Image (tube, rainbow, N blue to C red):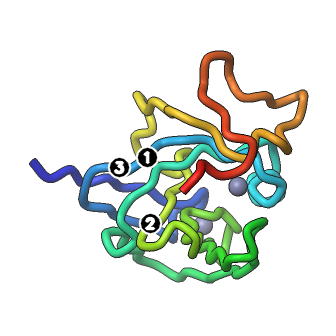
């Protein structure tokens, strides 16, 4: 069974469609995700990068992550919403920002990364497996 997931930015002009099953659902507490989201963490849904297709005007912001590897972020030039990121360290994985999904109900995050920089006002939920930085590879 093929699953198609859709979503988009706050103003609606940047949309995406993803075919396939999520490879991971988790939360990132790194300082870059704090800046990007404007809050304490980012909840992400990982898919094969090649399965993510966008429509509408899109811009990229590129910055090296904590690992020294490039992270490409796709965002809407009109409203500024980031819809996805492509951390080079993950290879062929793109991470959709969970809040941009059309139907974000029912997602179950199974782990958190960069617990070392989590803020006391937005701590990982009790019971969630938290890695200090990235999981060992
Ligand atoms: Zn927008
Ligand atoms: Zn992060």
Query: Gap between marks 3 and 2, in whole Å?
Result: 10 Å
Q: Earlier in the sequence, mark 3 or mark 2?
A: 3
Residue 117 at x, y percent in the picture: 85, 44
Which image quarter is the C terminus in?
Answer: bottom right
The label on residue 37 is none
Q: Which mark is residue 22?
A: 3
> In the picture, residue 111 is in which quadrant?
top right
Alpha carbon separation for disc pair 2 and 1: 10 Å
Residue sitting at 88 percent across and 28 percent down? 121
| Left or right side of 13 for 51 | left
In what quadrant does ligand 1 lie? bottom right
Q: Quadrant of residue 19?
A: bottom left
Q: Identify which residue is drawn at 70% across, 68% down.
A: 80
- Residue matched to label 2: 93
Q: Which mark is residue 24?
A: 1
Spot the residue most to the right.
Answer: 120
In percent of the image, x 20 and y 50: which residue is there?
3
97 to 128, vertically: above or below: below
- Whether 132 is drawn above or below 58: the answer is above
Residue 66 x %, y %: 78, 66
The tally of labels here is: 3
Answer yes or no: do the residues labelled 1 and 3 have beta carbons within 8 Å? yes
């Amino acid at each position: 069974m093929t699953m198609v997931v859709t979503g988009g930015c706050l103003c609606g002009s940047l949309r995406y469609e993803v075919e396939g099953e999520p490879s991971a659902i988790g939360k990132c507490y790194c300082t870059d995700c704090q800046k990007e989201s404007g809050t304490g963490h980012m909840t992400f849904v990982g898919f094969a990068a090649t399965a993510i297709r966008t429509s509408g005007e899109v811009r990229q912001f590129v910055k090296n992550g904590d690992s020294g590897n490039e992270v490409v972020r796709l965002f809407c030039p009109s409203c500024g919403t980031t819809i996805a990121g492509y951390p080079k360290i993950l290879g062929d994985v793109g991470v959709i920002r969970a809040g941009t999904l059309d139907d974000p109900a029912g997602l179950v995050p199974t782990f958190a990364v960069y617990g070392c920089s989590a803020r006391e006002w937005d701590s990982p939920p009790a019971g969630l497996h938290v890695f200090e930085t990235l999981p060992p590879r």
